[in-house]
Amino acid sequence: MCEGRQTYNACVRIPWATLRQSFVEVYKGFIYKLDQLSDKSYEEICVLYSALWIQLQMLQFGISLGSIVVESPPSEAASGFTRKQLDEKGIRKFELHYLVQLYHTFLTGRNLRVSPTFEEYFLENDISAEKHLLCFDWASLVYILTVIKSPPSHHPLVCENSRDLLDVNRLEGSNMIKPSVDDPETAHTYELASLAHIRDALGAAFDITSDDGARYLISHLNSLGFLERTDLANLWVGDDATTNHEEEYCSFPLPVGLDLSNEVETLAAAIEACLSDLDLSINEIGLLLLTRRFWYDRMITDDALRRLTRCLISWILAEVERSIHCPQSPTDAFFGQDDCIATVLRDHVPKGLALPGVRSTEAAPWPPHASNHRTPGISFHNGRVYIDYRRELMSRYAAKWMGSLHDDDRSAYADMICQLSQELAGDSSFESGPESRATEAAERHLRSIIKLGQTSVIFTVFEDVFQQWLYLLPRDHRQVCGLFCSLRNP
């Protein structure tokens, strides 16, 4: 908000008039009157609101923490203002406050025009536009990126209302290869795209006609690591009215789960490979790929969701504390990685070697985490630290990803948990084979369910999963089902 002005280390003292003028100069493209908003789409107003809301939060928190001091003229301070003229921090309101309130009212109280692209997304995911802010929803940003990377045949590149600031015209004469619908070899997700193409895609697919709004959304995607310039320069370096954005290209470093590309298979395989490793740093890379590039969305295929959920459950079940003390226990045959984990802990702990992936430095990470285990005096060669770090990764990444599945459809989540844990138990049916084998399979299945419950990834469907397990028991063991149901429903 105060770009180009001198700042100080301790605080920033700025007159109220200068603060207001600075905002109007920097964000003049975000200022619209009431009658001008009737032609704006939901996506465009959402982007404008998000940009200004962030600035308002920065201003208010800066004032609260004392890093920003807004000075008022002595005459105004003496006369005083009414409560409606002041915000919650006691600062006189100006255009920023009124615009945030105006855009929020439009988003929540009016039936705004939603682009067909996002309307389909909302219907598929059962989302209400009035309660959704696309700039702060990771799945929505991934969807926007997927549309940008898609060939022009999937969204007509027409943006008649765009000014020449970003040179957003049709890509005739552009050096970019335009895929054809009839040519399967070219119908592929882009790995490179010009800024002009990205701008046109936002205008055609999401009805974002404002150049300032489109520029902000592209910068937002850039700050989140979804795209970057090929020359690694600042996204809008040297930007002016004469800049040709058709010659400035951006790359998309990693695929996402919704891409129209075979690289999605590579992404899923990379996640599986990372989670199968014993090194916790590599595990964290896989979990980051899962939560940042493959966040749950109903538009992802059921096979992909099942595959990733199975991989995640397998990684969670790989931790059995008993294997540290009893690596040859019978249950180790069920959990695929237990023997390896026990071997690593047995080989590293007695010799005082660093455990794989456990950071041994005393430097505290940023941002700090409530469950951070870097306590002075604790040995980083202790096997318990390995388990603690693993559980921290689970609560920070795995539990949140699985929680999104649970919140979307609890019944389907319970079915998936029961089925996948049964598959990992090694038997597809408890009815097959001799009675002793069926009993052992049921016991292994129950152990996995209990383990998932202890790690808090079953959430509220534990009774449903447990009841399904009871009905999967062999016939001569099913009398307990009636007892369980009678206790559950007296």
Image: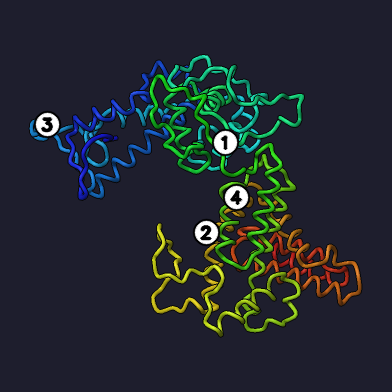
Q: Which residue is mark 1?
A: 145
Q: Find the distance from the CA under tag 3 to the CA under tag 4.
A: 51 Å
Can you say whether 381 is above or below 289 in the image?
below
Q: Nearer the viewer, mark 2 or mark 3?
A: 2
> Going 50% across and 43% down the picture, which residue do you hit?
225
Residue 111 visible (yes or no): no
Instruction: Tell which circle, 4 or 1, labels the residue nearer the N-terminal end.
Output: 1
Q: Residues within 10 Å of mark 3 (few under 14, many from 20)?
A: few
Instruction: Say whether residue 199 is left or right of residue 22.
Output: right
Q: Are marks 4 and 2 in contact (CB under 8 Å)?
A: no
> Going 57% across and 51% down the picture, which residue do you hit?
291
Instruction: Say whether residue 403 is left or right of residue 234.
Output: right
Q: Nearer the viewer, mark 4 or mark 1?
A: 1
Can you say whether 472 is above or below 60 in the image?
below
Q: Secondary structure at mark 4?
A: helix
The circle drawn on residue 404 is 4
Q: Residues within 10 Å of mark 1 (few under 14, many from 20)?
A: many
**x and y, in percent, of residue 392 in the image:** 52, 65
> Going 73% across and 46% down the picture, which residue do you hit?
302
Q: Which residue is mark 2?
A: 396
**x and y, in percent, of residue 428 in the image:** 83, 62
Q: Find the distance from the CA under tag 1 to the CA under tag 2.
A: 25 Å
Q: Amino acid at mark 4?
A: Ser
Q: Nearer the viewer, mark 3 or mark 1?
A: 1
Q: Residues within 10 Å of mark 2 (few under 14, many from 20)?
A: some
Q: Find the distance from the CA under tag 4 to the CA under tag 2.
A: 13 Å
Residue 200 visible (yes or no): yes
Q: Secondary structure at mark 1?
A: helix
Q: Amino acid at mark 2?
A: Arg
Q: Are marks 3 and 1 in contact (CB under 8 Å)?
A: no
Q: Amino acid at mark 1?
A: Leu
